[in-house]
Amino acid sequence: MKVFFGNILKYLKSLFNCRIAPFIVFLDEALDFISFLLELFESFLLLFDLVIDSIETHSECGLHFVSRNPTREIALDKIVHQS
């Protein structure tokens, strides 16, 4: 009986070391990468929010952005006057 359980433990140990452990390391690295991507996306959202806030602040002060595209400038003026 002792030999039987000893063989089962050896098999489980070899299975864990050879097949499962690299998969666990891969999952850990994949989760770290996904976490990094989410933090990067969150920083882009915060940057976008900051840009939107600065545009709203400038439009409230009566400042206008200089644009080389006249149709875009007209569209910005319409947006500023509507708000």
Image: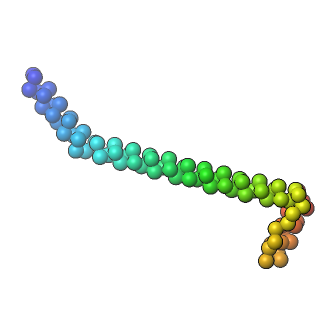
The answer to whether 23 is drawn above or below residue 8 in the figure is: below
* Quadrant where the image shows the N terminus: top left
Figure colour scheme: rainbow
Q: Position of residue 24 (x, y in %)?
A: 34, 43
Asked whether residue 80 appears in the rendered view, the answer is no
Q: Position of residue 36 (x, y in %)?
A: 50, 50
Identify which residue, 38 or 5, lies in the foreground.
Answer: 38
Q: Residue at position x 87%, y 63% from top?
A: 63
* Quadrant where the image shows the C terminus: bottom right
Asked whether residue 17 appears in the rendered view, the answer is yes
Is 30 situated left or right of 1 in this image?
right
Q: Residue at position x 75%, y 56% from top?
A: 52
Identify which residue, 33 or 6, lies in the foreground.
Answer: 33
Q: Position of residue 58 (x, y in %)?
A: 83, 59
Name the residue furthest top.
1
Q: Position of residue 43 (x, y in %)?
A: 61, 52
Q: Residue at position x 81%, y 71% from top?
A: 66
Identify which residue, 68 or 5, lies in the foreground.
Answer: 68
Q: Residue at position x 13%, y 28% from top?
A: 6
Is 2 situated left or right of 33 in this image?
left
Q: How many marks?
A: 0
Q: Which quarter of the picture shows residue 62? A: bottom right
Q: Which quarter of the picture shows residue 77? A: bottom right
The answer to whether 19 is drawn above or below residue 49 in the figure is: above
The answer to whether 31 is drawn above or below residue 66 in the figure is: above
The answer to whether 19 is drawn above or below residue 63 in the figure is: above
Q: Which quarter of the picture shows residue 8? A: top left
